[in-house]
Amino acid sequence: MKRALLAAVVLSGCADDPAPTTMSVAVPQALVDCAQPPADTDLRARLWVSGTDAPCPLTILASGVSGDCVVVPGIERIFTLDWFVVVDGVDVVLAQARKSLDLGGEVEANVALVFADDDYVVAGCRDMSVDSLDGAGSVDVDGVARPVCDLDDDGTANLDEVCAGGDPLGRP
Amino acid sequence: MRRGDVVTTLLAVTTLALSPTASAARVTDNTAPVITHTPPLSCPVAAVSQAGTPPCVVEATIVDPSGVFDPTLLVRLRGVTAYERVAMKAVDGQPDHYAATVPAAIAGGGDVEYLIEAFDLQGNGPARAGEEAVPLVLTKPVAPTPVTAPVEPPVVEEEGNGLLLGVAVAVGVIAVVVIGAGTAVAIYALRPPAVDEVTVSVSGPRPFTPVAP
């Protein structure tokens, strides 16, 4: 299985901050092998555009995802692509990719935005529903802050748990 | 993660030890600017000067903690589909106050429909006063008295070798024609039309490959 690498980077503190900080960095990966992929009827995709509150829905195709999203130009925009399923009413983000487009200058009326395998991460995802620019690193599930792409916070990504037939929410 | 189900922790601050002060102090701004605008009853009633049409100015107060980006007046004659975009400029000495002048061709042509929009420097927006489908209206604007401006002859310079330089400036088009000594060169600099919206066509692969059980 081509699996994402999680590199734990320990940054030593500088002189005025003796407490070291641990930060997990998700390494962009290629496709993940999936033994029990979600059905296309359950799989969803959406595109968050910085500066807008609601995501742009995308269409799931056999080859991937496609869609047209209308954006007001005049500034650099951040585009965040979510692949997700809904489990018990909770959006379970399986993979996420982010790209920026500079729409600040003279731009064409039609622009292509192409994501590749290596653009996806399955850890370190951001919740874009509260901040379409930077997002948030965690969401509350049953009153507990959980990593967006590891909703049961067990160290295994949502995508891996879904593909293994497990419950990404970790509920009994 | 439906919005109703999830209360997202806003204190998602990634503290990098290498820059502890800068990273921890960041304030999230995910709201569009606030536009306060009182529509004028009509364009100003003023005598037409020889300079042209009396100005029809639309003003608004636009506030955002991150700073206001690209405040714009979208304006059109009633009955016209497309809006013309006019950048709103900050008014000197009046913080958060912006103004734009309705183009004379629109102000003098009948009822004027308009809206105001603005983003902030974080990309939030557009905030709008008025909507494209339901714009604000300036009724009964003062129709300007037609002013016949003297037609300026093209600038013509003749030099010793017979070089003729003509400069013509039209809306969005600058044409420079240089004719001399049996050589004619025409250079056209065309400014592409402004784009009000961009259609972003998105495509991407599946993040997983199904494998046989």
Image: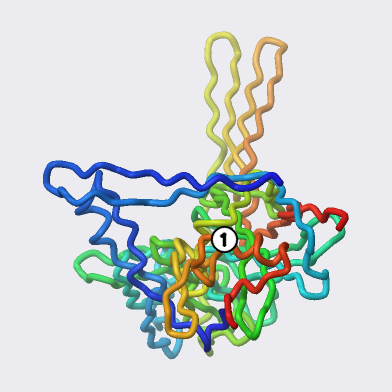
- Which residue is located at x 59 percent, y 52 percent? A121
User: Pointer 1 indicates a residue of which chain?
Assistant: A
Q: x, y percentage for residue A45?
A: 70, 67
- Say few, some or many: other residues with alpha carbon within 10 Å of mark 1 (under 14 / 14 to 19 / 20 or more): some
Q: Considering only vertical position in the picture, is A155 above or below B4? A: above
- Total number of numbered discs in the rendering: 1
Residue A53 percent location from the top left of the image = 53, 75
Residue lying at the far left in this picture: please name it.
A16
Picture quarter with the C terminus of chain B = bottom right
Q: Amino acid at mark 1?
A: Thr
Q: Can you tell which quarter of the image residue B18 is in?
A: top left
Residue ranking furthest to the front: A172
Q: How is the image coloured?
A: rainbow
Q: Place residue B114 in its image quadrant.
A: bottom right
Along the line of sight, which residue is nearer the eye, A94 or B95?
A94
Asked whether the viewer can see residue A51, the reply is no
- Percent of width and height locating residue B115: 52, 78
Q: Position of residue A78 (x, y in %)?
A: 53, 56
Q: Is residue B165 or residue B73 the one in the foreground? A: B73
User: Would residue B52 be found to the left or right of residue B162 on screen?
Assistant: left
Of helix, strand and loop, which one carries label 1?
A: loop
Q: Quadrant of the N terminus of chain B?
A: bottom right
A170 versus B18 height, above or below: below
Eyeballing the image, is A31 above or below A44?
above
Taking B101 as reference, is A102 left or right? right
Q: Residue at x 46, y 48 (%)?
A: A25
Residue in the picture at 76% in, 57% down:
A34
Using the rendered image of the protein, determine whether residue B82 is visible from the camera's viewpoint. yes
- The residue to which callout 1 is attached is A156
